[in-house]
Amino acid sequence: MSHARALLQLALAALNALLVFFVWFGALLALANDPQRISKPVALSLLPVCAVVAWRSRRHVQRIAAGAASTAQAIAEGATFGAALAVGLFLLNWLVPSAFAAGHPLDGFRPNQVADWFALLAMLGPLVAIAAVVGAVHGYALHTLNMFIMRRMNEA
C-alpha cells in the first residue's frame, strides 16, 4: 500500500470520528438546559464513541479500497457497535457512582434473582435497540460519505 493511500485512510477515519463528535456534541448541547455545565461530561462520553468510529472507519475504508465493502456490511457493523457502545457506556456510568447522586438504576441489583435480570433486560433492551438503529444510520451515512470521497479521489 502506498504512503498516500495509507494517509487517505487515516484522514477519512479521522474525518468520520470528528463528524460524529461535532454532530453529537452540538446536538446534545443544543438539547441541554445548561450547556456549559454538561459540555465536559458530554465530550468525555463521546471520546470512546469517536475512537470506535475512527477504528472501524479505517477498516471500512480499507475494504472500500479493496473493493470488498458493501452497504449492508456497513449497516450491520454500525448496528453492532452502536449496541455494544450503549451497553459499554451504561456499564461505565454504573462504575462511576458520583455520576448518579440520586442513585443508579441498578442499585441493589442481585445477580441471583431472576426478577432483577428481567428488570435489567427491560431497562437495557430499548436502549440497545435505539443505539443499534442509530449505529446503523451512522454506518450507512459514513459508508456513503467514504464511498463518495474514495470515488472522487480515484477520479482525480
Image: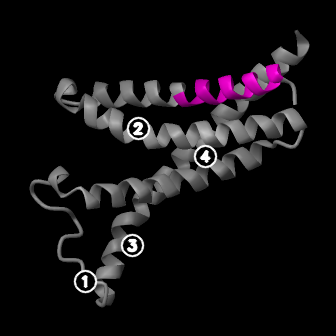
The residue pinned by badge 3 equals 121
Q: Which residues are magenta?
A: 3-17
Q: Nearer the viewer, mark 4 or mark 1?
A: 1
Q: Is residue 131 above or below residue 37?
A: below
The residue pinned by badge 4 equals 136
The kind of residue on which mark 4 rests is Ala
Label 3 crowd bin: few (<14), some (14–19), many (20+), radius 10 Å: few
Q: Are marks 2 and 1 in contact (CB under 8 Å)?
A: no
CA gap, disc 3 to disc 2? 24 Å
Q: Is residue 32 above or below residue 131?
A: above
Please tell me which of labels 4 and 3 falls first in the chain. Answer: 3
The kind of residue on which mark 3 rests is Leu
> Residue 64's image quarter?
top right
Q: Quadrant of the N terminus?
A: top right
Q: Quadrant of the C terminus?
A: top right
The residue pinned by badge 1 equals 110
Residue at coordinates 19% horizontally, 24% vertically from top-left?
36
Please tell me which of labels 4 and 2 falls first in the chain. Answer: 2
The kind of residue on which mark 1 rests is Arg
Q: Secondary structure at mark 1?
A: loop
Q: Position of residue 148 (x, y in %)?
A: 77, 22
Residue at coordinates 69% horizontally, 26% vertically from top-left?
145
CA gap, disc 2 to disc 1? 30 Å
Please tell me which of labels 2 and 1 falls first in the chain. Answer: 2
Q: Residue furthest left?
A: 102
Q: Nearer the viewer, mark 4 or mark 2?
A: 2
CA gap, disc 4 to disc 1? 33 Å
The kind of residue on which mark 2 rests is Leu
